[in-house]
């Protein structure tokens, strides 16, 4: 912003002299005096028409003189001498700094970037005939920001979108001196809003940057109607286009789900669907149905196999963060034997209309003497193969309750179940005499997706502790959303449970919520009896107890009417299914300005949108790529964050560190966040980790259609009384009229006030004398 | 969903593992089926003393469910009545009016989701059954007993009872009544002396003859008792859609 004195000095100075009423005289008073004088004259004319003998000319002239002096006595005229300056009009230049401006301005892929051409236009406008020129950047999602000239094209064209309407409104908010004209320097790939419908104030001109675009195939748009619901096909409408003369025929379109890397660090993804787009007249629209099996935020990659000659490979794929809702939670409940605990869990699962439960209980073992042929039994075979090879993916969560893997043929399917969890499924392992180590899971693939170690037992060792105990809630469990409802009912009191399966230490980032008051693990830590953990894209719960039913039906339960059981399991299943109510923290990667989505090649920030702590807190986060890195020079995000934050969400946490640029690479990222007390994370009431997915695109919507859009600029210029010119024709932009500013003002009376009154009195006296002599009253 | 091959494969695994069968008793016993004997309205014990233990034994012998070999006898006012959601109230004669504390205890038992089986051991007089209905009407004044339909899941929780009806020492009427809440049986009124069909002495001799069909009827009564236990343990599990094709097929092939 330039200082006012400097800009004023660039105007042309002049002196103006005029007569004005006395200072402080109201206009209405002057008008009233004139009206009274005119009325008197009218009455005088009427009077003279009746009195034919009176000296008319003399009476009229003295009457007019008396009226005039009376008016002057009221006005008491002053002489004004003003020194004025013609100030050059203020012109605001809005330079589009959105990502499309990083593209070539010509059909040559190696042509000058549009942002460079725009910079040249700005320099010319500064030196041109417009006098005062203020330059702002247009290219945040909303509003304006300061224009910066240095850096690579990608670093300068770092806005995720360009909204002209909000930018013009923001100009009005931040400057007292409204511009006489606005000049938008852009390729036309902008959001215009109501600027294209009505005049918004000052004249709006545009400089159209970019003549053409390089040969290119692109995913132009991805649309879907309604809400994505787990297990239900969602039709994606995908628009593919070829521009710049690129010859395209049939192009293959692929939709993949990007998932978090598996524990070995290998990127993980699944092709959901592929299709062929046949390009006609430069574009094609195909519909591909995708079925996402897991609720929560999911990352999709939609890509097109571009032909040779494609100049912008970055827009051959789009990354989509999609929130998948869950109409009903589909749960597979498998119990090794019927007990009252099984009854309690099934009753609860069936009581919730939002849960679709499929149960399989082992009601009979080979040793049981049923004393009846099969056709007199209401028993069905346990369809272990079908369940775990064909139908497993259709379930949101699997609950194993006191289930022995070996006798029922589950062991061969444990790798598939582990993979299911890593890909986003939920797993609950409930204790009992045949659960965990006793069920043959200790050295199995299922152990890798369980949040606790399972002790390997020698033949003489017990797999369970049968003594009753009251668990201890850990520090992190207190106030954690997953147990908050239970805590609100029971307070700090937990019932006595009858024994537990023996479990080891928490593993793989797992968190113990309840521990045994006496038993310890092999490492000497309190033995967990309830632990939770993220595993790849999925979540897992280990519950060593087989008597949580005492929260539903017992003397203890009677105190709360059995509501505590509902609270416990709703919390556990809600957390398992990533229900936002049970997530302590919510956050995502955004543009560092905080106003737009994360853009590869631009500074990024972590936006914390929900936190269990309001005020000073400690944020810990990890950021991991979902796929092999596609980073360019200078692009790096921190893998770990440990920050002090303060205030209420939303909170913007910049990602630039000493050796980390904080500039996002292209791709999808898994975020894991926890927020706790500033100084001691272990004392935090709700320091449970939350996982989220976020994506950063190199071009995003801005590169979906790389062609300059002069027509859009012409529309807004026409509506707002301006013109559109090319960079080489800036002289065609009409300069706005100068503004006049008074810088010195000298006011002096022509006569003193009493003199005007005396003159008026004399004039009235003369008039009265003439009237009397003429025979008038 | 399942095919025969899968079942056989599964069964093979089961057979091998059966040798390693490990039914822990201490840990896990807590959730085991227990036909607790309800002492209320002047009843001082089960009408057939050995019946509750036999009931447990049959459940444990015939199913995978654990069961308490020595079921307890508990007063309606005893907090331990809430140790498990199943209670058995049997008798032969008239009942005294339940005290306010007994009413409160039973009301709490049922409102938390408990299942009470009322077994009239003298169906010929029906005195116990009538009095039990009268007293339970004071416990649950807003609910009246209704006949359990033949299609109800309680007739197929483990055995496919053919015909689908209650069984006991006496053949009695072909239906049983129940108080139903939230779709679940809460109180079942039996008028067939189920305990009489189950009662067996320490030497393994059945204590009472079963009429009119003798051992066949006794076996049906035992199956009915097992089904009641499995209903207490799994509720409406056998109503799940996944079971429907199998059970329909078996019913269709039934003689």
Image (spheres, coloured by chain):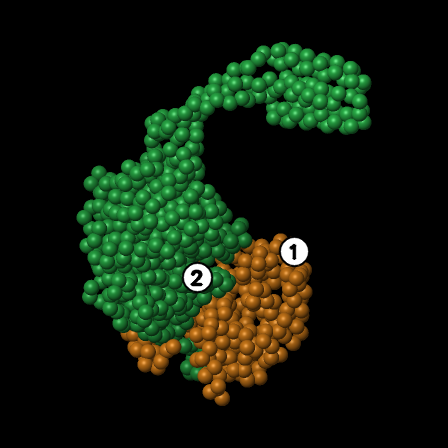
- From the top left corner, tell me how far across and down residue B125 is, in percent: 67, 74
Q: Which residue is mark 1?
A: B99
Q: Residue at x 54, y 64 (%)?
A: B115
Label at residue A227: 2
- From the top left corner, tell me how far across and down residue B117 is, in percent: 56, 67
Image mark 2: chain: A
Which hue is chain A drawn in?
green
Which hue is chain B drawn in?
orange
Image mark 1: chain: B
Quadrant where the C terminus of chain A lies? Answer: top right
Helix, strand or loop at label 2? It is loop
Residue B144 visible at all: yes
Helix, strand or loop at label 1? It is loop
Q: Residues within 10 Å of mark 1 (few under 14, many from 20)?
A: some
Quadrant where the N terminus of chain A lies? Answer: top left
Q: Residue furthest bottom?
A: B255
Q: Nearer the viewer, residue A534 or A722?
A: A722
């Amino acid at each position: 912003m330039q200082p006012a004195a400097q800009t004023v000095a660039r105007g042309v100075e002049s002196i103006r002299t005029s007569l004005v009423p006395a200072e402080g005289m109201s206009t209405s008073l002057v008008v009233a005096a004139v009206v009274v004088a005119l009325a008197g004259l009218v009455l005088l004319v009427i009077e003279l028409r009746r009195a034919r003998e009176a000296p008319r000319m003399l009476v009229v002239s003295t009457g007019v003189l008396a009226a005039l002096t009376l008016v002057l006595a009221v006005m008491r005229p002053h002489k004004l001498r003003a020194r004025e300056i013609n100030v050059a009009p203020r012109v605001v230049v809005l330079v589009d700094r959105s990502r499309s401006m990083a593209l070539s301005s010509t059909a040559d892929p190696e042509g000058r970037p549009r942002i460079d051409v725009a910079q040249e236009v700005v320099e010319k406008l500064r030196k041109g005939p417009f006098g005062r020129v203020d330059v702002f950047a247009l290219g945040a999602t909303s509003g304006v920001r300061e224009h910066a000239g240095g850096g690579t094209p990608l670093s300068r064209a770092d806005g995720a979108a360009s909204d002209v309407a909000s930018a013009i409104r923001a100009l009005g908010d931040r400057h007292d001196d409204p511009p006489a004209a606005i000049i938008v320097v852009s390729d036309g790939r902008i959001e215009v809003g109501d600027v294209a419908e009505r005049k918004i104030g000052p004249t709006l001109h545009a400089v159209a940057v970019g003549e053409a675009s390089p040969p290119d195939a692109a995913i132009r748009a991805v649309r879907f109607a309604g809400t994505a619901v787990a297990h239900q096909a969602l039709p994606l409408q995908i628009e593919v286009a070829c521009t710049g003369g690129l010859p395209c025929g049939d192009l293959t379109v692929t939709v993949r789900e990007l998932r978090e890397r598996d524990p070995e660090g290998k990127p993980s993804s699944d092709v959901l669907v592929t299709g062929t787009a046949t390009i006609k007249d430069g574009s094609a629209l195909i519909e591909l149905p995708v079925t996402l099996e897991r609720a929560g935020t999911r990352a999709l990659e939609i890509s097109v196999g571009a032909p040779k000659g494609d100049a912008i490979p970055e827009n051959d794929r789009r990354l989509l963060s999609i929130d998948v809702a869950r109409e009903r939670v589909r749960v597979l409940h498998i119990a090794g034997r019927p007990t009252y605990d099984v009854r309690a869990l099934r009753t609860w699962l069936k009581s919730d209309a939002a849960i679709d439960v499929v149960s399989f209980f082992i009601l009979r073992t080979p040793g049981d003497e049923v004393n009846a042929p099969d056709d007199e039994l209401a028993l069905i075979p346990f369809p272990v193969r079908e369940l775990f090879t064909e139908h497993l993916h259709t379930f949101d969560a699997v609950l194993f309750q006191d289930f022995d893997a070996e006798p029922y043929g589950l062991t061969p399917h444990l790798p598939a179940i582990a993979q299911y969890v890593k890909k986003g499924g939920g797993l609950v392992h409930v204790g009992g005499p045949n659960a965990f180590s006793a069920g043959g899971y200790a050295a199995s693939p299922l152990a890798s997706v369980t949040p606790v170690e399972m002790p390997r037992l020698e033949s003489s060792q017990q797999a369970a502790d049968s003594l009753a105990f009251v668990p201890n809630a850990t520090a992190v469990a207190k106030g954690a959303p997953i147990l908050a409802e239970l805590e609100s009912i029971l307070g700090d009191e937990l019932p006595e449970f009858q024994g537990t399966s023996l479990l080891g230490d928490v593993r793989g980032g797992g968190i113990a919520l309840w521990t045994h008051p006496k038993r310890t693990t092999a490492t000497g830590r309190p033995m967990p009896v309830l632990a939770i953990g993220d595993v790849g894209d999925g979540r897992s719960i280990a519950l060593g107890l087989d008597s949580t039913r005492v929260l539903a039906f017992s003397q203890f339960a009677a105190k709360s009417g059995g509501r505590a059981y509902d609270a416990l399991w709703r919390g556990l299943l809600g957390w398992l299914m990533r229900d936002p109510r049970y997530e302590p923290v919510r956050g995502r990667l955004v543009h560092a300005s905080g106003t737009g989505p994360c853009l590869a090649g631009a500074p990024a920030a972590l936006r914390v949108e929900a936190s269990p702590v309001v005020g000073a807190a400690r944020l810990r986060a990890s950021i991991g790529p979902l796929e092999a890195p596609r980073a360019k020079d200078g692009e790096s995000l921190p893998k770990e964050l440990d920050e002090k934050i303060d205030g209420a969400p939303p909170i913007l946490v910049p990602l630039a560190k000493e050796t980390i640029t904080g500039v996002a690479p292209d791709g999808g990222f898994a975020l894991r966040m926890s927020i706790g007390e500033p100084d001691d994370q272990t004392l935090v009431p709700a320091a449970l980790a939350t996982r989220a997915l976020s994506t950063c695109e190199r071009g995003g919507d801005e590169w979906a259609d790389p062609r300059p859009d002069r027509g859009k600029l012409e529309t807004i210029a026409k509506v707002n009384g301006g013109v559109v010119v090319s960079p080489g024709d800036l002289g065609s932009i009409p300069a706005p009229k100068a503004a006049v500013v008074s810088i010195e003002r000298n006011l002096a009376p022509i006569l003193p006030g009493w003199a005007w009154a005396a003159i008026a009195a004399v004039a009235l006296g003369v008039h009265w004398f003439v009237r009397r002599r003429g025979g008038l009253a | 969903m399942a095919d025969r091959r899968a079942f056989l494969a599964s069964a093979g695994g089961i057979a091998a593992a059966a040798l390693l069968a490990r039914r822990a008793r201490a840990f896990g016993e807590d959730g085991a089926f227990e036909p607790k004997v309800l002492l209320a309205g002047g009843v001082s014990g089960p009408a057939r003393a050995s019946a509750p233990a036999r009931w447990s034994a049959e459940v444990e012998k015939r199913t995978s469910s654990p069961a308490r070999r020595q079921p307890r006898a508990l007063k309606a006012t005893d907090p331990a009545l809430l140790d498990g959601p199943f209670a058995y109230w049997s008798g032969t004669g008239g009942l005294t009016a339940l005290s306010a504390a007994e009413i409160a205890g039973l009301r709490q038992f049922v409102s938390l989701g408990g299942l009470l089986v009322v077994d009239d051991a003298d169906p010929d007089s029906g005195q116990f059954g009538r009095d039990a209905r009268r007293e339970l009407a004071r416990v649950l004044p807003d609910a009246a007993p209704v006949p359990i339909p033949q299609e109800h899941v309680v007739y197929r929780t483990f055995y496919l009872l053919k015909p689908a009806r209650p069984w006991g020492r006496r053949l009695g009427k072909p239906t049983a009544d129940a108080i139903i809440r939230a779709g679940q049986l809460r109180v079942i009124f039996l008028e067939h002396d189920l305990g009489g069909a189950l009662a067996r002495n320490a030497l393994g001799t059945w204590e009472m003859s079963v009429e009119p069909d003798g051992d066949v009827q006794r076996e049906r009564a035992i199956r009915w008792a097992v089904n009641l236990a499995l209903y207490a343990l799994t509720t409406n599990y056998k109503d799940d859609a996944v079971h429907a094709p199998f059970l329909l097929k078996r019913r269709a092939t039934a003689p």
